[in-house]
Image: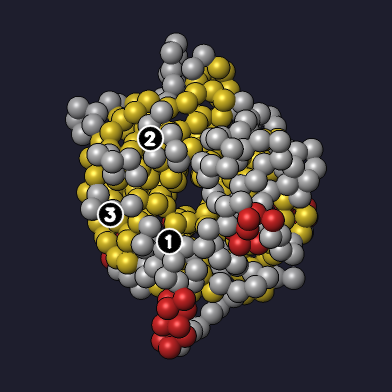
């Protein structure tokens, strides 16, 4: 049953919620066994394990698909998944979960990617990751040339420095011809930049807006078609801001933290376009579920939530990051894929699981 969630809270209620959000709830390990109610789906494949036993390492993915085969470190693929190991760097996985490349870049947390940036006269894929590495704090940027040949691979491009003490969440957004990079600090500091390339091919970032969410925040996703920027305040709820920097800090609480809907930590966020329909998927880390809203209307409409249970591979618990891409994502995912981090991975350390969007759509009757 679809319900439109329009949540109006009084100032007193917001103050009470914020007062409860004074520290981060860490569900790594013990909380991973808390599984809430939701419609069952199954992951169809997974990546190799990330990090050492007991280590909170795998964090956040991003998905790229190409209409034509591309080369990554000598592998011919139809796309890839970028996934952070927040203890050591960035993995590039194939659409079957295999490792294509590893960039030992340090303490990367969230990653996102976007296509269409012109660099040196060529259309490039740009990847960005929030970086907590001492001496490199900010956003670390990478490029991938989809038309590249030979030793083509994801390569370091540059950095966006910041005054944010601990970069945490990150996402890209396209506003017309403009590409924006949006950084979320651990304590809810938001910095929005526009990103271009200089005449000599170097990254140029210009700060457009800054504001504070209020407390610990991470998940970040944009829907340019409705001028929306969605941000998860981990122990408070899901907020909708304007994507246009001129909107300042004006916001609407779409869903407060609540049992059976969104449970702290509210972590990753991603959007998926399925034809004319668009969806927002969140990671409800506290009960290992994924609530989903349809967002192409005037207000977000809640459509249900899923639980990824044991199937061809083990189920998903305590998820942090989530990414999705609709449309054809290689032969394996002809109508889209959702990739999620798995906190406790049977038979190994943390990793990333791939879910066929068709399975989610069928399970929820979308």
Cα–Cα span, label 3 and label 2: 17 Å
Q: Position of residue 213 (x, y in %)?
A: 37, 67
- Relative to 242, is 248 on the left or the right? left
The residue positioned 66% from the left and 51% from the top of the image is 317
Cα–Cα span, label 1 and label 2: 21 Å
- Residue under numbered circle 2: 106
- Residue under numbered circle 3: 164
The tag earlier along the polypeptide, 3 or 2, is: 2
In this rendered view, identify the residue nearer to me: 76 or 284.
Answer: 284
The residue positioned 28% from the left and 33% from the top of the image is 158
Image marks 3 and 1: residues in contact by CB distance under 8 Å: no
Instruction: Find residue 209 and report its image quarter.
Output: bottom left
Q: Position of residue 206 (x, y in %)?
A: 22, 49
The residue positioned 61% from the left and 62% from the top of the image is 286
Q: Dot 2 lies on which element?
A: loop
Instruction: Find residue 88 and report its image quarter.
Output: top left
Q: Position of residue 304 (x, y in %)?
A: 69, 64
- Give the class, few, some or many, for how many residues have Cα within 10 Å of label 2's Cα (few <14, many ≥20): some
Question: Farthest top residue?
Answer: 150
Q: Is residue 167 above or below residue 328?
A: below
| Residue 309 in sight | yes
The residue positioned 63% from the left and 58% from the top of the image is 31
Q: Dot 3 lies on which element?
A: loop
């Amino acid at each position: 049953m679809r319900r439109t969630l329009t949540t109006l809270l009084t100032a007193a209620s917001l103050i009470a919620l914020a007062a409860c959000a004074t520290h981060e709830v860490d569900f790594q390990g013990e909380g991973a066994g808390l599984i809430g109610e939701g419609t069952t789906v199954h992951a169809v494949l997974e990546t190799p394990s990330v990090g050492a036993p007991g280590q909170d390492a795998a964090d956040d993915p991003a998905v790229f698909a190409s209409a034509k085969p591309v080369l990554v470190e000598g592998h011919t693929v139809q796309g890839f998944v970028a996934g952070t190991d927040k203890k050591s760097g960035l993995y590039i996985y194939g659409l079957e979960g295999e490792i294509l490349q590893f960039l030992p870049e340090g303490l990367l947390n969230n990653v996102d990617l976007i296509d269409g940036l012109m660099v040196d006269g060529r259309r490039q894929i740009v990847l960005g990751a929030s970086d907590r590495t001492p001496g490199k704090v900010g956003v670390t940027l990478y490029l991938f040339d989809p038309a590249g040949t030979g030793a083509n691979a994801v390569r370091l491009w540059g950095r966006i420095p910041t005054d944010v003490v601990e970069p945490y969440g990150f996402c890209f957004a396209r506003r017309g011809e403009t590409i924006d990079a949006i950084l979320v600090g651990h304590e809810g500091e938001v910095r929005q930049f526009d990103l271009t390339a200089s005449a000599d091919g170097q990254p140029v970032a210009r700060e457009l807006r800054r504001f504070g969410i209020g407390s610990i925040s991470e998940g970040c996703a944009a829907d340019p078609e409705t001028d929306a920027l969605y941000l998860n305040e981990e122990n408070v709820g899901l907020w909708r801001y304007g994507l246009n920097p001129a909107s300042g800090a004006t916001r609407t609480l779409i869903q407060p933290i609540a049992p059976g809907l969104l449970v702290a930590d509210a972590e990753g966020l991603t959007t998926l376009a399925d034809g004319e329909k668009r969806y927002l998927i969140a990671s409800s880390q506290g009960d290992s579920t994924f609530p989903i809203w349809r967002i192409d209307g005037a207000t977000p409409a809640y459509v249900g939530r899923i639980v990824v249970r044991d199937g061809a591979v083990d189920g998903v618990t305590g998820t942090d990051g989530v990414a999705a891409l609709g449309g054809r994502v290689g032969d394996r995912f002809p109508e889209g894929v959702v990739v999620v981090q798995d906190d406790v991975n049977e038979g190994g350390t943390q990793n990333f699981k791939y879910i066929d969007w068709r399975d989610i759509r069928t399970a929820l009757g979308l």
